[in-house]
Structures are given as structure tokens and as C-alpha cells.
Image: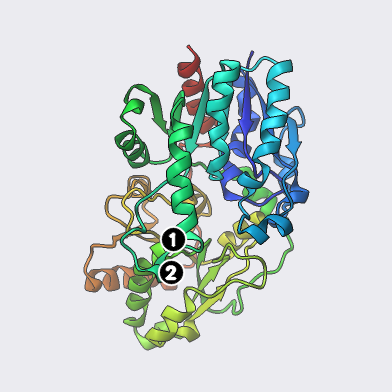
Amino acid sequence: MKSILIISPYFPPDNAADMQRVRMSLPYFERLGWKAEIVCVDEQYTDLDKENLFGITIPSSIKIHKVKAFPKNITSKFGIGNISIRSMWYFKLKVDLLLKSTRYDLIYFSTTQYPVCILGSYWKKKFKIPYIIDLQDPWHTEYYQNKPKTKRPKKYWFSYRLNKYLEPIAMREVSGIIAVSQGYIDEIKFRYTTLNKVKSKVIPFSAELKDFQIADGVNDKVYFTDEKKIKILYAGVVGNIMVASITKMLTAFKSLPIEWKENVVFYFLGTSYAPKGTGVNSVLPIAKELGIDNSVVEVTNRLSYFNTLRHLRLSDGLLIVGSDEVNYIPSKIYTYILANKPIFSLLNSKSPGNLILTEYPTVCKTYLKDSQHHINSELHNFIYTILSNRTSYTNEIVFTPEVMAKEQVEFFNSVIC
């Protein structure tokens, strides 16, 4: 039995998107020949909402090592809130002890809290242990460099320079790269030519049908305000990179017949990463400018993971809106498909997500480069389908969590061979 140490700063009960790949894979790793242990930050040092139901999905045999972090109320005075920076010293101390006392075949960083990945280079030199980095999103990126300051993320000046400095340190000794998009791999290998000989593999995110079964028993607040109206849902954070697609989609909705608009409500739930009660609306201002804000409900507060799944089930249709960034692939694609609802997608035509969506006839696919007239027509057809037939579909996915785990294990084996 091989052994792997997984570095994931956020882990259940934290409700974080970047630990979902690991959470869903854990039940399968051991039967595939790999014993996994987790190193994460103790939840008392994180400020994310907690989701205790995640505990049901994690095998009791998994050993979880928790580390401390410098308190945010202190570090924030110096402008530092990032969990990986606050916890990096404690990760070093804990993993040093583990590597001295236990033999591991591989270290696996699966997180978007990328600064912690620089420890991989240190551990490889000190303990001769290979490490893999999972690029769930781009790390250092030039995407915002030509954007107005108002369109850049908060603390962009600092994060841009920090990422530009730290990324090459982590990539210097990396033994393998996993990414959700081939574009992420191509970009990182273009930036560092020394990585051309480093093994890499594209592994998309998956979705777990069992999670929906758990969600069926959740009794959290439901945000749908009028059961008689058609409920079309987008669940997740809305960033500046999505403004163009949301604007085109809402513009298309404005073109619909009045009697249709009176019977349809768009719900955008959990649109901000900001702490509860402090999020700023990002969709409603667009709707107000178009004069259709009466048909849009936005909730900035994050929903629990299982309550989100419940809302997907209770909706009449789902939205996938994307970015003008060509490599962007929505992490919830398979989750949306398993919800068994009609889907309207508006992505960059080169997004890898389109290849997945093409396999499902319940998806109405449009692209950012399409004319507004074409998007209007396709949204019209999408709404008509829902109005004329409010029935669920039965979708199955081939890329299950077990398959995702097999893909990871195959890559683990190739890296250490």
C-alpha cells in the first residue's frame, strides 16, 4: 500500500470549493492502493461557514492532521488574511514531524490557497519526497493587468506581486501537475520551460450523486419567493470576469414577451466571498440598469453546500455563466447535470466546459462571441421549454468521483515510478 500526504488548508467542516476534489476522492483512494492522510488548518482558525454534514462523506479511517494559523484579527492589521500565509509556518512544523516519523511516497497539494505550495520544494530537498500541485485555478496570472483598477480584485497590487514571486519557487522542484484545464498546464509550462519534461494531466472536477441524497434531508432556508413562477438559478460566486456573460444573458431576458417575464424569476445565490452580511450585489446593478430588477433576486451570502444542492433540485432551470478567460471551466458543471434540470450556458467558445455540456441534450449552449440576437433566440427557446414542460430529466455522468480518483491514482503512480 502506497501512502500520500494531502495538503489542503481548507477541509471539512469548512465549506470551501477547493477541497471538494479531495473530499470526493477519499472514499476510493485506499481501495485503489493508496492510503491517504490529510493536513489541514484547524477550523477554529478559519472564517468560512461550517458544513458538518460533510463528515458523513469522509471515511472514518482517514487520518486528519490539523495545524494552527496566526489569528486573522492580528494579521489583518498588516493586510494579511490569506489562510495559507497565516498557517504556512505551522504546516512546515507539522509536516516536518510527519516526514521524519512516517514514510510517505508522495505529497499532493490540492488547494487554491497556493502560497503553501512553496513548502513542496523545501520538503523535496530535505526529505527527497516528490510532490504534485493541483491547479484548480490559475495561480499567477496576467489576466487583470490590462483591466481598469475598478475591475481588479481587492488587494490586487499585493497578490499579483506575491504570486509572481512565489509561483516559481513552488514550480522549481514540482514532480507533477494536475489541472482542470489543459490551458492552465500550457500556460504554466510556457512560463517555465523547465517544466516541459514534468508530467502533467488534465482531470476535471466531478460530482457526487450521494451528496444530493443527503441534501434531500436538509431543512435550511429556501430563498425561492414565489413557487408559482419559473425559478431559474445560478448558484455561486459572481466575479468581474462574469459581467459580460451575465449582461448578455439578462439583455436576452429583457427581449422576451412581457407575459413571460412576469412569470420568470432569476435567482443568483451565494454571489460573494465576503463575510456574511457584508457582500455587495454584483448582479442586481446590471438588472437595474436594464430595467428588469423586479425579475432578479440576488443573495450575496454563501449557502451551505447541501442547501445549494437542494436549491438546484427545487429550481426549474439552471444557468452556467462563464468568463471571457478562455481556459475557465465552471467547477459545478457535473453538479448541475446531476440536478436533472434544463440548463442554459453562456461560456467562452473555447472553454473546455463546452465539450462536457455537448454530451447532454438538456443543455442549451451559447457562446460569448454569439450575436445578441442569437443569444436572445436561444434563451427564448430555453424558457419556452420550461414553460411548456416543467419536468425533471434523468442525467447520468460517466466521470464519477470514483473515475476521478482512478485518474488521480494513475497519475500518482506515474510520478513515483
- Tell me if residue 9 comes above or below residue 414 in the rendering: below
Q: Is residue 99 left or right of residue 283?
A: right
From the viewer's perspective, tell me whether residue 165 is left or right of residue 94: left
Image quarter where the N terminus lies is top right
Q: Residues within 10 Å of mark 2 (few under 14, many from 20)?
A: some
Q: How is the image coloured?
A: rainbow
Q: Which residue is mark 1?
A: 342
Residue 204 can be seen in this image: no
Quarter of the figure with residue 223? bottom right
Residue 200 placed where, x, y %? 39, 28
Mark 2–mark 1 Cα distance, whole angstroms, equals: 8 Å
Secondary structure beneath dot 2 equals: helix
In the rendered image, residue 265, in percent from the top left (x then y), is placed at: 49, 77
How many numbered marks are there?
Answer: 2
Q: Position of residue 331 (x, y in %)?
A: 48, 49
- The one nearer the camera, 4 or 193, is 193
According to the image, label 2 marks what residue?
A: 386
Q: Residue at x 52, y 27 (%)?
A: 121
**Between residues 411 and 105, which one lies in front from this camera angle?**
105
Taking the spot 45% from the left edge, 42% from the top edge, the residue there is 165
* 285, 160: nearer the viewer: 160
Looking at the rendering, which quadrant does residue 146 occupy?
Answer: bottom left
Q: Note whether 392 is above or below 139 in the view shown.
A: below
Q: Earlier in the sequence, mark 2 or mark 1?
A: 1
Amino acid carrying mark 2 in the image = Ile
Amino acid bearing label 1: Pro
Give above or below for 156 relative to 89: below
Which residue lies at the image location 63% right of the left edge and 26% below the top edge?
5
Q: Are marks 2 and 1 in contact (CB under 8 Å)?
A: yes
**Residue 212 placement, left or right of 411:** right
Please tell me which residue is depicted at 46% across the width and 64% down the height of the picture. Answer: 239
